[in-house]
Amino acid sequence: MHAPQIRDEEGIQRPLIPFDHQRDIWGAWDAGGSVLIVKARQTGISTGIMAAVAHDLAHGKSTLVISRKQDVAQHLAGICKTLYETAIYEGKPRVIRSNLQELVVQGGARVIVETASQSAGRGYTVQRLVLDEFAHMPWQDQIWTSAMPTAAKHGNVCVLSTPNG
């Protein structure tokens, strides 16, 4: 993924300049397969992942994000929405629905954000699956079982978390 151009608060076009670790994560994300990230807090990892999710949305890929708490899930949805709306991509699909749980663009690609539950992720088909703070989620086994089939045959799974234990 190349760093996109964004419009800042004044409407000025600027490049989104990632930290080296964010760029490394984007490379792993683009390479396909699964990505496991054990992280410290406040390092920009979640923002970097949501930038990748917004980029994928602009290119027709759907993502399911499952987080352990509702306020965190909604915060991640807000980051994705802001990054998508400020990103400049040629032919970027128009947003047709946006709320605290879903961002849908013209053409049908979407980002779905859910809170951890025993059936989280069940019933979706997406190209990307993000499990945020997975080490701290209740019902890890049930979430893994219900969410893993949501990633399409050649989809990506990103598990990220601060350590637990």
Image: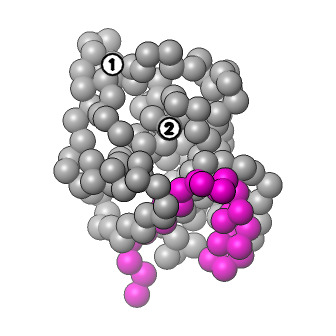
Q: Which residue lies at the image location 35% right of the left edge and 39% below the top edge?
A: 1
User: What amino acid does circle 2 point to?
Assistant: Asp
Whether residue 13 is situated above or below residue 81 in the rendered picture: above
**Which quadrant is home to the C terminus?**
bottom left
From where the camera sits, is residue 20 visible? yes
Q: Which mark is residue 56?
A: 2
Q: Is residue 88 left or right of residue 75?
A: left
Q: Report the front residue among 99 and 65.
A: 65
Relative to 163, residue 11 above or below: above
Q: For residue 163: magenta?
A: yes
The quadrant where residue 108 appears: top right
Residue 127 drawn at (x, y percent): 61, 48
Please say if 145 is above or below 122. below
Could you tell me the amino acid type at mark 1? Arg
Tag 1 residue: 7
Quadrant hosting residue 164? bottom left
* In this picture, residue 124 sits left or right of residue 41: right
Report the magenta residues as a range: 139-165
